[in-house]
Amino acid sequence: ERLTNTNAMAMEPISTYAAPGLITLLDQALYRANEGSLTGTVSAADVTLAYFIQLKREAKSLLSSLLQDYQTHSEAPECAEMLESFSRFCIECAVGAIDHLTTDKLALASNVDYSMQQSSSNSSTSTSTGNNNPASDPHTATKKDQKAVEGVLLQLEYELGSRKERRRDCYETPRLICPDYVWADDASLYCQRIVKAMQKHPAMTLSSGSTAVRFELPSTLYQVSLDKLYVLVKKDLPSEISKFRAAIEADTATSKRLYLVKCEYRAPFRAFLESHATVSRLPKLSFVDETLNLYTAVESKKSSNAKASIEEMKEDAIAKKKQVLEHPKLIEALQVEHYCEVMEVSMSRMLHPFAELARMLENKNCHLKEVTGVINGSDLPALREILRRLKSIQIRKSSNEASTIRPLLLDIQGVSREDSPEAVDIFPFGRFPGLPPEKAIKKRIDRLMLILNRLYDVCTSKRGGLVMDGKTNFDPPPALMNECLALDPELFHAQYDDWYSGAKRQAEMVDAGYFDMFPESIRRAEVNLGVLKASRKALEGLQERLQSLVKDRTKRFDALKEMVEEVCERELDLRLTLLSPPVDAIMRLPESKSINGVFGNHLQFENEVLPIG
């Protein structure tokens, strides 16, 4: 009898709604059902991931040693610029490889319009290398190597930029829940490509394992760190990637089948969510039917109160909209936002000539050098770093969106640009951990103004400080330098204080939850008011359109229900009953702390940040 009851309970179907998070659960169950057949691929990918994390750690260690040496010695080490660019390049490549190994390409394609971003990235010509070109040494770098490195950096900028998602924009988590052939093939090929690009970097000739002509490094610490990177790039990573490729080929049958199964329920699910979003944005069909019935009653004169009811509904919609728009918190938020925007624009105008100067120095391949009385070796890291950060602000991107100075404003607050809590980040304006936030911000602003003034002195000095193509003949435009000279530190400090106060007030209002329902309330009131003001003929056309959209949503759900239930029964031996969510339900990806993905525990152990999930 107990066995019979257990079998009966096992045969009972599980009911769930078709909402974001369903795909994650299906992927998790599908992977658990086929985990044994993917052991080789997952194990090889995990080892490859560990080596890239080690590469990132060693590159950050080398970069940290270089920056500390800059600050403690008056002279920069020999070939320091090449080592710095190599360490940065290794960090960026490692971040890209980790991202490809731990995210699902199918999920990313569902959440982001890759075709649009791909076309815009192809038209972009700027890279994220900064003033330190990885192939900046003319004696060791060839044009072919330089193009290879710059090409990888350009792709890294696109790939990493496209993964900066918000939870409200996601239908499913980008975490790798169920490995498949497309993920494995894409990740392995990407890893091979960036390893080849790192091998072509001119700094590889400085390693003791290289047979090419090289320079002697003045520090044993640099040599040890560089040798570790050399072994990882030349031996360990190529070997593990080859094993990864072999494991992929061995598990091809299972991984390709899993890819097809994942596509089976992803396509109808995405189609249903798009149809649901379309229906939820439009007026409710019941409200349109009610309005049409009132119009019919007015025309047929069957009800004397119909016209009064329509006017009452209009007044009610106007009152609701007015109530939200005149809410004191909303008015305060708009005023604070306008004030912050004015302050930000004013600060942007002061920093714009320096941003143009940084881009001009990069385009002319100018490099900073130590000159007695003009620029000291200890000032080089801060100047190089500020040039790297200035050149990426206030530019027109390929997506027709201009970048703002907010990253620089966050730097002044001491906010790290690295996601990992143990990352070796660079704070060009100082950290000041023992001071209160306001005093630390004041010191960072003073440091920023000092660096900008030093940059102006270097560019206008006749004694050098900048090297362009081996010659100290850089002549900046006088008009641009006059704009740089107009920088007012006191005004910038006052405007930043006002902007910072407004930003803190905005954060307080958001945390208090004042704006959770404002947008939906305003939108719904405007939609209802538009329906009430429309003519009868327009309402009849709207009614027909809504009915067709609701039917289309129902058909898409039926297709999704049939596919999901079939896949669950065929692949998972599971009886699942899929339920349709309400028409006005808001679809949001729920947060899950129990499903970290295939490599989630590994990433958490290494203090890496997990994708949205």
Image (tube, grey):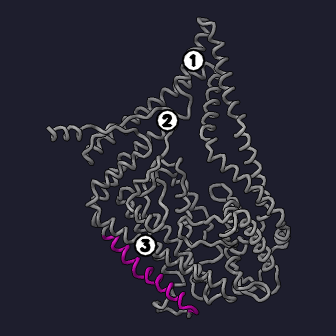
Q: Is residue 580 left or right of residue 503?
A: left
Crowd around label 3: few <14 · some 14–19 · many ≥20 (10 Å): some
Do callouts 2 and 1 mark residues in contact (Cβ within 8 Å)? no
Which comes sooner in the sequence, label 3 or label 2? 3
Q: Is residue 488 left or right of residue 92?
A: right
Mark 3 and mark 2: span between their CA atoms?
45 Å
496 is within the stretch colored magenta: no
Residue at 37% of width from left, 68% of height from top?
46
On the question of residue 241 being in view, the answer is yes
Q: Is residue 10 above or below residue 97?
A: above
For label 3, the residue is 192
Tell me the magenta residue range: 217-246
Number of the label disc, if any, that sits on residue 221: none
- Circle nearer the viewer, 3 or 2: 2
Along the horizontal axis of the image, is 99 left or right of 380? Answer: left
Residue 249 screen position, x and y as percent: 30, 66
* Residue at which label 2 appears: 585
